[in-house]
């Protein structure tokens, strides 16, 4: 009969560093998505208030693994859920309703996953 024993030592400072990097990468990924959407010129735009001042990343729950891209204007919901509106294209050439769809399940659906991986790797070297 053979007796085996093992000792596990956790590197708690390194675990905390990696956990903090996860949070930072999540927040930076949301900021990158916001930038990506603005640069895609897909949000309806007249004065720029909706996409610039009134749309922001809410990081208040990032430690729980959740960030949100919030548009705080009262008209954002109406514009988003009514793609049949005739949006003027002078400021944003591709303005339309449901402007997040390409990043949810469209051509750019892997954007957040890939951005998170790159950011996390940059922050941690892992």
Image (tube, grey):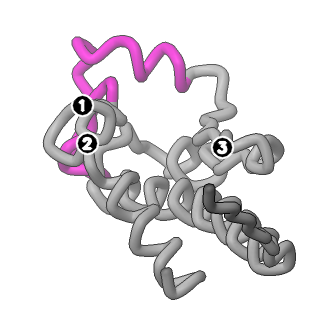
Quarter of image, res 104: top left
- Could you tell which of marks 3 and 2 lies nearer the N-terminus? 3
Q: Which residue is the site of mark 1? A: 105
- According to the picture, the residue beneath numbered tag 3 turns out to be 67
> Which quadrant of the figure has residue 42?
top left
Q: Earlier in the sequence, mark 3 or mark 1?
A: 3
Mark 2 is surrounded, within 10 Å at the Cα level, by few (under 14), some (14 to 19) or many (20 or more) other residues, namely some
The residue stretch that appears in magenta: 76-98
Residue 93 at x, y percent in the picture: 19, 49
Magenta-colored segment: predominant secondary structure: loop
- Identify which residue is drawn at 60% across, 45% down: 55
Residue at coordinates 63% horizontally, 39% vertically from top-left? Answer: 68
12 left or right of 48 in image: right
Q: Which residue is mark 2?
A: 109
Residue 55 highlighted magenta (yes or no): no
Residue 114 place in picture, x, y as percent:
33, 61
Q: Residues within 10 Å of mark 1 (few under 14, many from 20)?
A: few
In the image, 15: left or right of 90?
Answer: right
């Amino acid at each position: 009969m053979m007796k085996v024993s093992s000792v596990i030592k956790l590197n708690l400072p390194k675990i905390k560093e990696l956990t903090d990097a996860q949070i930072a990468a999540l927040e930076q990924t949301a900021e990158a998505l916001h930038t990506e959407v603005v640069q895609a010129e897909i949000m309806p735009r007249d004065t720029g208030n909706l996409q610039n001042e009134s749309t922001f990343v809410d990081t208040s729950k990032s430690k729980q693994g959740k960030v949100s891209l919030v548009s705080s204007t009262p008209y954002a919901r109406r514009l988003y859920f009514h793609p049949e509106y005739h949006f003027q294209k002078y400021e944003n050439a591709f303005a339309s309703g449901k402007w997040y769809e390409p990043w949810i399940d469209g051509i750019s659906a892997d954007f957040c996953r890939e951005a998170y991986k790159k950011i996390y790797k940059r922050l941690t070297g892992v």
